[in-house]
Image (tube, rainbow, N blue to C red):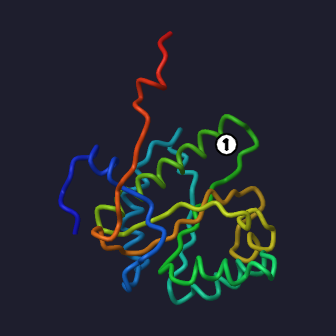
């Protein structure tokens, strides 16, 4: 388990874990535990503009088949390879309010929740990567997983436990001063 760290250290060290997952089951109840903390994300009017669909390892193949139904046949093997070793998926869904301000506030809220979830998972060595593949917009995919009209799939999180020693954390960021202007 990763040693207790400051918030700033966790923010700086967390990386997206895209592969090399350990052969451990990601349990729905563990994800719910993390979500129960992640939902404390700021959200305007406490609207809580989110819902989630969990796909366990047991249901992974059915999920992959749903994805493949939205892809060209020539890409099936490549897509399958990207998804076959992912222990679990979490689909993040928000309501699409027709009022732009509300829509943007809701998108910001669920995005903040997802970041909270990634940070909380990192502490438990549960790695995640937030994906927004083209098929999330496909009506066939949306219907198959129960996304309603008036809802947006914000992303699909791929979830899996990882060995911190196997993941290099060589990242760079621009100093904020270079992006800051004063009024």
Give coordinates of residue 15: x percent, y percent.
Answer: 40, 57
Asked whether 39 or 1 is in front, the reply is 1
Q: Residue, x 33% and y 71% (percent of image)?
A: 166
Q: Which residue is mark 1?
A: 103
Give coordinates of residue 181: x percent, y percent.
Answer: 49, 16
16 with respect to 92 (left or right)? left
- Label 1: few (<14), some (14–19) or many (≥20) C-alpha neighbours in 10 Å: some
Asked whether 18 or 98 is in front, the reply is 18
149 with respect to 19 (left or right)? right
Asked whether 77 or 116 is in front, the reply is 77
The residue most toward the left is: 3
Q: Residue, x 67% and y 64% (percent of image)?
A: 133
How many marks can you see? 1
Q: Residue, x 18% and y 61% (percent of image)?
A: 3
Give coordinates of residue 117: x percent, y percent.
Answer: 42, 58
- Figure quadrant of the N terminus: bottom left
Q: Residue, x 50% and y 9% (percent of image)?
A: 183
88 with respect to 93 (left or right)? left
Q: Is residue 105 above or below residue 150?
A: above
Asked whether 175 or 55 is in front, the reply is 175
The residue most toward the top is: 183
What SS does tag 1 mark?
helix
Give coordinates of residue 175: x percent, y percent.
Answer: 40, 31
């Amino acid at each position: 388990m990763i040693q207790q760290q400051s918030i700033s250290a966790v923010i700086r060290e967390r990386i997206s874990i895209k592969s090399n997952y350990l052969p451990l089951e990601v349990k729905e109840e563990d994800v719910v535990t993390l979500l129960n903390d992640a939902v404390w994300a700021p959200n305007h009017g406490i609207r809580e503009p989110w819902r989630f669909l969990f796909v366990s390892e047991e249901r992974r193949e059915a999920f992959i088949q749903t994805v493949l139904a939205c892809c060209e046949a020539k890409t099936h093997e490549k897509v399958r390879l990207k998804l076959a070793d992912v222990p679990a998926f979490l689909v993040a869904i928000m309501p699409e309010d027709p009022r732009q301000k509300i829509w943007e506030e809701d998108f910001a809220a669920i995005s903040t929740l997802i970041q909270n979830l990634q940070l909380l998972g990192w502490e438990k060595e549960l790695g995640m990567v937030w994906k927004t593949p083209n098929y999330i917009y496909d009506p066939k995919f949306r219907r198959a997983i129960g996304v309603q009209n008036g809802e947006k799939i914000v992303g699909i999180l791929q979830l899996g436990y990882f060995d911190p020693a196997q993941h290099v954390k060589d990242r760079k960021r621009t100093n904020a001063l270079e992006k800051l202007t004063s009024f």
